[in-house]
Image: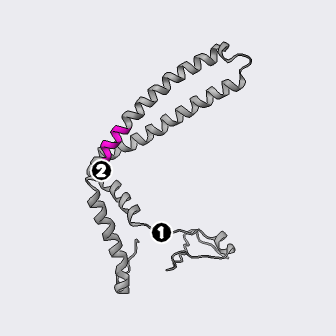
Amino acid sequence: VTYSDAFKFFMTTTLPNPHYSPETSVKVTLLNFAITPTGLEDQMLGIVVAKERPDLEEQKNELVVQNAKMNKDLKEIEDDILKLLATSDGDVLADDTLVNKVTSSKEVSNDINQKKVVARVTEANIDVARESYRPVAYRTAVLFFCIVELSNVDPMYQYSLQ
């Protein structure tokens, strides 16, 4: 049987939650394109803010990355201390390496916690500014769902993304 890499076979269904046999499910990739109005509104808010105020969206994304890095650093510090505690012999207070690590970890932890407080305040300010674009995102979501429902009025109003 000759096979073409360009061959694509799409099956659609109007069933809200279709169930297929295990043999079929293993051989295909099922995609659920269902979206909720709230989810679409949040996505649209991100897109609108990125277009209108790219500085805000970039700042928000940087905050997310910084928060993730700070959480990772805290976790690594915690793991290092636990490792040193597990491998220490005798009195833990006599182990200079462990005491120095705990002291330096406390300083780093305090610094990270201060940065987290500043990041929370900054994120709150960004969210307040982003919320001014919420009506646009809401109207976009409503418009999308109106277009989706047009096919119920007349089949001629079906649309495609291609």
Choose the circle earlier in sequence order: 2 or 1. 1
The stretch in magenta equals 120-127
The CA distance from mark 2 to mark 1 is 26 Å
Disc 2 crowd rating (10 Å Cα; few below 14, some 14-19, many 20+) is some
Secondary structure that dominates the magenta span: helix
What coloring was used for the rendering?
one colour
Q: Secondary structure at mark 1?
A: loop
Position in image of residue 158 (x %, y %): 38, 80
Amino acid bearing label 1: Phe
Nearer to us of marks 2 and 1 is 2
Q: Quadrant of the C terminus?
A: bottom left
Seen at 63% across and 19% down, the residue is 98
Q: Secondary structure at mark 2?
A: helix
Amino acid bearing label 2: Arg
**Residue denoted by label 2:** 130
Looking at the image, which is closer to me, 1 or 20?
20
Please report contact status of discs 2 and 1: CB closer than 8 Å, yes or no: no
Disc 1 crowd rating (10 Å Cα; few below 14, some 14-19, many 20+) is few
Q: Quadrant of the N terminus?
A: bottom right
Is residue 45 depicted above or below 59 in this figure? below
Is residue 121 depicted above or below 132 in this figure? above
Seen at 33% across and 56% down, the residue is 45
Seen at 39% across and 34% down, the residue is 117
Position in image of residue 127 (x %, y %): 32, 47
Is residue 11 depicted above or below 45 in this figure? below
Position in image of residue 34 (x %, y %): 46, 69
User: How many numbered marks, from 0 up?
Assistant: 2
Position in image of residue 85 (x %, y %): 67, 24
Q: Is residue 18 left or right of residue 137?
A: right
**54 in the magenta segment:** no
Numbered label attached to residue 33: 1
Seen at 58% across and 16% down, the residue is 100
